[in-house]
Amino acid sequence: MLLRAEFRKLFPYRTVWVILALYVLLLAGFVSVGGGVTINGKQLGNALYDFPTLWPRLAYVASYFNLLLGILFIILITDEFQFRTFRQQIIDGSSPVGLVQGKLTVSGLLALFGMVAVLGVGLFFGFTRAPKTLSHAPETIGAVLLYGIQALGYLAVAGTLGFLIRKSGPAILSFMLYAWVVEPLIRFVTPDQLDRYFPAKVFDSLTPTPGREMINTITGSSNALLPIEAVPLALAYIALFWFLSYLLLRNRDL
Amino acid sequence: MILQLDNLSKHYGTTAALRGLTLEVEQGSVYGLLGPNGSGKTTTLGIALGVLRADSGAVRWFGQPLSTQSKQRVGALLETPNFFPYLSARQNLLLAADVKRADPRTVDAALELAGLTARQHDAFRGFSLGMKQRLALASTLLGTPDVLVLDEPTNGLDPQGIAEVRALIQRLAAEGKTIIIASHLLDEIEKVCTHVAVLQRGELRAAGPVGTILAATDRVLLRLAADIAPATLLHALGQLPWVSDVRPEPGGGHSAVLAPEHSPADLNRSLFAHGVVLAGLEVRHRSLEAQFLELTK
């Protein structure tokens, strides 16, 4: 019933489809031009699409588009404050837990959409540009799952800001400022052994920059967590942000 | 008892919106909540419906604290019709039915009731205020609740729409539903309500059956026979301890208020015994409006 109610809100909403289409187009567009990039006088070419390294590369590229999913999610939450539909749903029988569960479900659907899009784009480019390496595709498929967890993480942050600020413009701005300005600034003044535990840093550790191993050999070991180390922390942060959202909804007037 | 509000208080910043409000709504009553703008009507209903947090006090529906089960027995419209603007009337009602765990098939009947069957596939955002209000009223009836809570239900409706809502409320009341209406349209309340509570600045000024609230200050208009001096009347009235607030009336004659246990016949008999003969005696029922203005003065 909960899922059906959320579907009833999502499917007819054009904004949802526009942003999701934009997500797929930008991701696919970005990946398709990647082969033309020249590094050290050598064009990357179709080697870029070779499995098994395609999945981690794609997950890293997709991590930049979490912003779009986050913006969409903030719109979906702040809409309900603006239309007073959260209020009406409480009147009609929902509880704050029910409302939070509904949006948690939506965040799961958006993360799932992101994973399916990454899979689809990966398979498309793998098939068309590096078909000989397809047999290696399953080796690193876990990177897509890690990307899904990262998307859930950013959506949890976006959701909390939506529940906190209730207005789409300021909430979207805060989301971008937090991920790109505020947390990096705080990390900058925080000792190295601590800053890798910040939420956005933990989420980013799930999709490491491709070729980090090579960079590490030059600059010394990076202080970021390994993806597999970041998973439990990321899940803990996701739970924490959703709990904060619940507290906000429970303790304030609607 | 359908609804009990016990000593509710609520502040918005430093403004006290409700101060120790206690109210009880009995089963089968049509309960009118009256008060000027900002008197706390919507705050009271918001707390009762669980969307506003009271600073202190308790709400009980059907003798129990507010719960999902109790909410499913109450259909409510608070302040404004709250729907998704991009969804059609039908899609909005289907969604509301899901939240209320009501049968989606009841949506057709609700659309019919709202007179929106022909426009059920149009987006809510394109509706007039009256259409939005009718859709909200129809939505409150999904799942056939025992109790309806309607905050300004005739907002935005034309005279015909207002009459339709009144007829609907009377029909639902006749079916035995309990209805709680907040309104500043006194005329409407007087036409449909069995009970009223008057709020002012977050405090309860009066509450009870409409008849009691009104009858308490019905005035008796007295006109003397031509050969009797007014002073005789005033003297005779002064002898009767159950007569109060004697005033001269603009068209000649006097009016007074009787204590509840005394009837106009008692007054006629007593005055005649004092040698005062009346040429006319009339009970003037006070309108709810006059009573309301008196209470909130």
Image (spheres, helix red, strand yellow):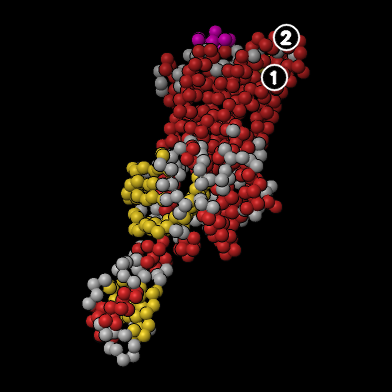
Dots 1, 2 in contact, CB < 8 A? no
Disc 2: which chain? Answer: A
Q: Is residue B103 visible?
A: yes
Along the line of sight, the residue nearer the viewer: B289 or B232: B232
Along the line of sight, the residue nearer the viewer: B49 or B122: B49
Marks 1 and 2, how far apart in space?
13 Å
Q: Residue furthest bottom?
A: B227
The residue singled out by tag 2 in the image is: A135
Residue B74 against residue A21 in the figure, above or below? below
Residue B295 against residue B277 in the figure, above or below? above
Same chain for the residues under marks 1 and 2 in the image: yes
Q: Which secondary structure, mark 2?
A: helix
Instruction: Answer with the quarter of the image where residue A144 lies.
Output: top right
Name the residue located 61 percent from the left edge and 15 percent from the top edge: A143
Magenta-drawn segment: A213-221
Total numbered circles: 2
The residue singled out by tag 1 in the image is: A122
